[in-house]
Image: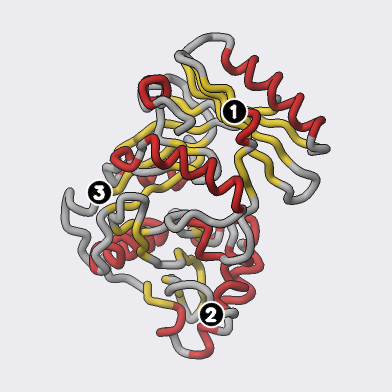
Amino acid sequence: MFFRWDWLRPVLTAPVVPTLGPVHPDALTVDVFEDTLRAAVTGDFLPYDKDRRWGGEKGETVLRGDVVHQPEQTLIPTLTRRGRGTVKVFAYGHRGSIVQEAAELAAKLAAAHDAANARVVPPLGPETSSPRGTRIHLKDFADRPCPDPGGPVRPVTDWPAAVQEIFAPFATAMAADGLAFLHTQMQAGRCGPVLTAAVENRVVGAIGPMEVRPDAMGCPQLLPQYFAVLPEARGQGLGRVLWRAAMHWGQSHSAAYQLLQTEVGGPSDRLCQSEGLTSLGFSHTTRA
């Protein structure tokens, strides 16, 4: 075993694991970190990797030979070959110099691997003041019932054909939110249902895909979704109705929880906070 849990656990201020992203606090074990090292050798997806659903090959891998593991800090570098390549160094520790040390390692490894980008990712605890980046939210389905909110929301395949045909231009318009990618997965039959909001036979919002899979503990997790509402349709409560419909779907399909990442201060962040979700911390990526 490479990692010492008595070294690593005290510096895990937020439940963020390299190549996997946020995990449930109960799944934050030394075995999960060890699994990322094994996956770096095989190049395969881990069985509980949320990105596995998209198929293909894992785009990000741990540079296991360059991990720095010490009593008060752990630096875990990863390499992504997409585009011009990116090296990220996940910086776990409380020392004031850790971000600078991580930046130096990221720059060094980016040069060694001919990657154009060098980044540092210091996970931060929920008590962080003036946070930036993304907030990690936990939706625990055991907390309270998630009733069907009603409203003009249903799976896209349940709408009349005329409405279904409008999804393609909607997805194109919301490409920046991942809807164009989602649409390609839908067309290939590689994802679960997508919930849509339609007004006057026009698709104005969507959230999906809706899928439940076991996490590292075998606990059923509602996987993250793409979520978008047309700018001109915002401010009417449709985003909240869509989100509540998604939570109703997750609870109805026996999900135990969902983890969500939102841009700090953004509309989805404010929605999750107003819905009473638990903040687990933050992840802020900076240039090295």
In the picture of the structure, the residue carrying the numbered disc 1 is 67
On-image quarter of the N terminus: top left
Q: Distance between the residues labelled 2 and 3?
A: 29 Å
**At which x and y percent is residue 186?**
55, 76
> Pointers 3 and 1 in contact (CB under 8 A)?
no
Q: How far apart are marks 2 and 1 (CA)?
A: 39 Å
Closer-to-camera residue (284/158): 284
Type of the residue with mark 3: Asp
Q: Residue at x 51, y 40 (%)?
A: 263
Q: Which of marks 3 and 1 is nearer the N terminus?
A: 1
Q: Residue at x 48, y 18 (%)?
A: 93
Does residue 129 appear to the left or right of 220 in the view shown?
right
Classed neighbour count for the residue bearing mark 1: other residues with Cα under 10 Å, few (<14), some (14–19), many (≥20):
some
Closer-to-camera residue (41/122): 41
Let me know if residue 125 appears in the view: no
Q: Earlier in the sequence, mark 2 or mark 1?
A: 1
- Please determine whether, in this image, residue 83 is positioned above or below residue 205: above
Does residue 128 appear to the left or right of 248 in the view shown?
right
Let me know if residue 29 appears in the view: yes
Q: Distance between the residues labelled 3 and 1?
A: 33 Å
Q: Residue at x 30, y 48 (%)?
A: 139
Q: Where is residue 252, by image quadrant? A: bottom left
Q: Which mark is residue 189?
A: 2
Q: What is the residue that sits farthest to the front in this orientation?
A: 1
Type of the residue with mark 1: Val
Does residue 188 appear to the left or right of 70 in the view shown?
right
Element marked by disc 3: strand
Element marked by disc 1: loop
Count of marks overlaid on the render: 3
Q: Residue 140 carries which label?
A: 3
**At which x and y percent is residue 194?**
45, 71
